[in-house]
Image (cartoon, grey):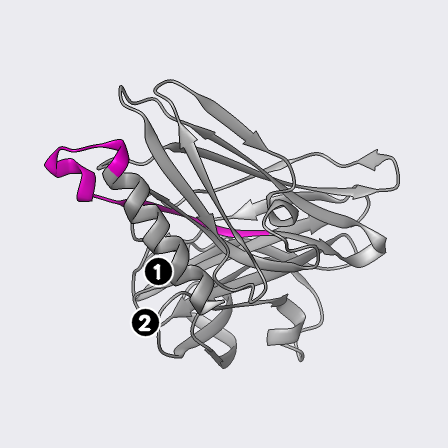
Amino acid sequence: MRLRVIAAAILFAASAAAAQTSPAAAEVSTVVVPVVGSVTGVGNVHWRTDLELRNDQRTDINVMLTMPAAPDANFIMLPLAAGASVRIDDVAVALGVDNGLSPLLIPTNARRSVNVRATAYGTRGTDVFPPQPIAINYGSSYFPVRVLNDLSFSDDFRTNIGLANLGDNPADFTLGLQRIAGRNLAVVRISVPPKSLWHMSVQSAFPLITAGDHFSVVVETSAPETYVYASVIENATTTARFVQPTFGAPADLGP
């Protein structure tokens, strides 16, 4: 994987230089989609991610797609003409990952990135469940304390939490489960290896908490190249809600 990423970076730099000869040619802007994947989950539902890229700039650009937490992933390089757009259905499969999850890195050889839209949805047989937009990180989302609000785990809902570490060293996370702001019901510490993603049900992190609604999970880490998210899924309809973290203290959601 590392050799392929190095080769991709070399090719990307070469294409960037060929596309532009101005000083701006050396600039690269990177967008992070916290999680994409192609994986089968509860109820034999297959989860997928579709991607749309749009170049709203006045010059032609080159874009690269990589999944750093998927060891066997390939990479894709795309030229995008000014004003052009492209849609990639099931982007993980397009990158050679048919059973796995990872953040998606999208470098662009320009000062400003392409516009990105990512949606996750489940399928089962011929059924296609409602798509859910995934929040895009156009810059660093790092903050020492990030909060995932309004989570549920019950007969009606289930929640998955994701901790992504794109750094070169292990990242240590402390997670506090709260119903009332500032009061931890349970605390767990998780170490995530470099270039990897921890994606598990909230019960896996807090096995002694059996059920509840309107919880928050406070995530603390000093590792800068990290991303945090959650997804809440309604069991009856398989409708998912992506939860982007907020910064600072959690909101008191009440009973």
How far apart are the alpha carbons under marks 2 and 1? 19 Å
127, 146: nearer the viewer: 127
Asked if residue 6 is positioned above or below residue 253 in the image, the reply reads below
Q: Which mark is residue 223?
A: 2
Query: Does residue 130 appear left or right of residue 222 in this picture?
Result: right
Q: Badge 1: how crowded within 10 Å, few (<14), some, or many (20+)? A: few
> In the rendering, at what x and y percent does residue 191 appear?
46, 80
Magenta-span inclusion, residue 28: yes
Q: Amino acid at mark 1?
A: Ala
Q: Amino acid at mark 2?
A: Ala
Asked if residue 32 is positioned above or below residue 186 in the image, the reply reads above
Q: Identify the magenta region.
A: 18-36
49, 212: nearer the viewer: 49
Q: Earlier in the sequence, mark 2 or mark 1?
A: 2
Cβ–Cβ below 8 Å for labels 2 and 1? no
48, 205: nearer the viewer: 48
Query: Does residue 212 appear left or right of residue 40 in this picture?
Result: left
Taking the spot 51% from the left edge, 27% from the top edge, the residue there is: 86
> In the rendering, at what x and y percent does residue 181 appear?
43, 63
Magenta-span inclusion, residue 113: no
Q: Residue furthest left?
A: 23
Q: Secondary structure at mark 2?
A: loop
Q: Which quadrant of the structure image shows residue 48?
A: top right
Q: Secondary structure at mark 1?
A: loop
Q: Say if residue 59 shows up in the picture.
A: yes
Q: Which quadrant of the structure image shows residue 27?
A: top left
Q: Which mark is residue 95?
A: none
- Tell me the quarter of the image containing the C terminus: bottom right
* Disc number lying in front (2 or 1): 2
Taking the spot 18% from the left edge, 44% from the top edge, the residue there is: 26
Q: Which mark is residue 249?
A: 1
